[in-house]
Amino acid sequence: MKSLFDESAHEEIQQRIESLTVESSPSWGKMSVAQMCTHCQKPLEVAMGSLKLSGKKPGFMKRLVFKIYKPLMYNDKAWSQNLPTVRDFIISDERELTAEKGKLAALVTSFHGHKEAKEWPLHPMFGKFTHEQWGKMQYKHLHHHLSQFGA
């Protein structure tokens, strides 16, 4: 799996974000292209510690389930379509595409700029991720949604 910390992956994602237009429509799901750009900002904000999720911490059973699914977050296997979404990542109001693309591109660059970081916040659901896992997971999430919109 590519990592958003790799220069070529960073450039690829930026080009794919730039290619989105108001005519971009999803192959699956209900989000508009602008909503998707807003949605994709949220995991980057969690990774960089600027967004704290509002839900309560998962109990023992959920932690056990999350432990089983954690490797799927950053491995080479593509994510399925229409996966459940964390409540804080659901964007239901309309957004303006140019503004949301700009915010997403800036966050991608900011995250990429942390390629030398040694300390990362705990993921609210999955716990500790390594530097490598964070980079792969962020790339995988962006790839999933940009592919959803043909980018």
Image (tube, rainbow, N blue to C red):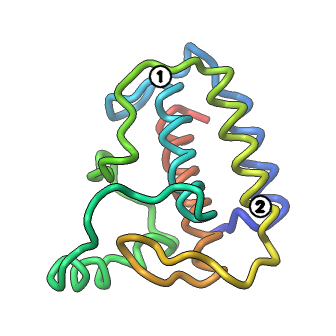
Residue that label 1 marks? 25
Mark before the other along the chain sequence, 1 or 2: 1
Taking the view exactly as shown, the residue that stands out farthest to the left is 61
Position of 92 compared to 142: left or right?
A: left
Check the image and report above or below for 104 versus 122. Answer: above
Determine whether the residue tagged by mark 1 lies in a helix, strand or loop.
loop
Taking the view exactly as shown, the residue that stands out farthest to the top is 23
Position of 136 compared to 93: left or right?
A: right
Amino acid of disc 2: His
Crowding at label 1, few (<14), some or many (≥20) Cα neighbours within 10 Å? some
Residue that label 2 marks? 112
Count of numbered marks:
2
Q: Give the percent coordinates (x, y) of residue 29.
A: 33, 34
In the foreground, 117 or 146:
117
User: On the image, which quarter does residue 103 sit in?
Assistant: top right
Residue at image point 53% right, 60% down: 46
Determine whether the residue tagged by mark 2 lies in a helix, strand or loop.
helix
Marks 1/2 in contact by CB < 8 Å: the verdict is no
User: On the image, which quarter does residue 77 sit in?
Assistant: bottom left
Q: Give the percent coordinates (x, y) of residue 69.
A: 32, 76
Q: Give the percent coordinates (x, y) of residue 123.
A: 46, 73
User: On the image, which quarter does residue 68 sit in?
Assistant: bottom left
In the foreground, 149 or 58:
58
Position of 22 compared to 61: left or right?
A: right
Check the image and report above or below for 62 versus 20. Answer: below
Of circles 1 and 2, the one toward us is 2
Amino acid of disc 1: Ser
Check the image and report above or below for 143 versus 134. Answer: above
Quadrant that contains the C terminus: top right
Residue at image point 47% right, 29% down: 35
Crowding at label 2, few (<14), some or many (≥20) Cα neighbours within 10 Å? many
Q: Give the percent coordinates (x, y) of residue 89.
A: 40, 46
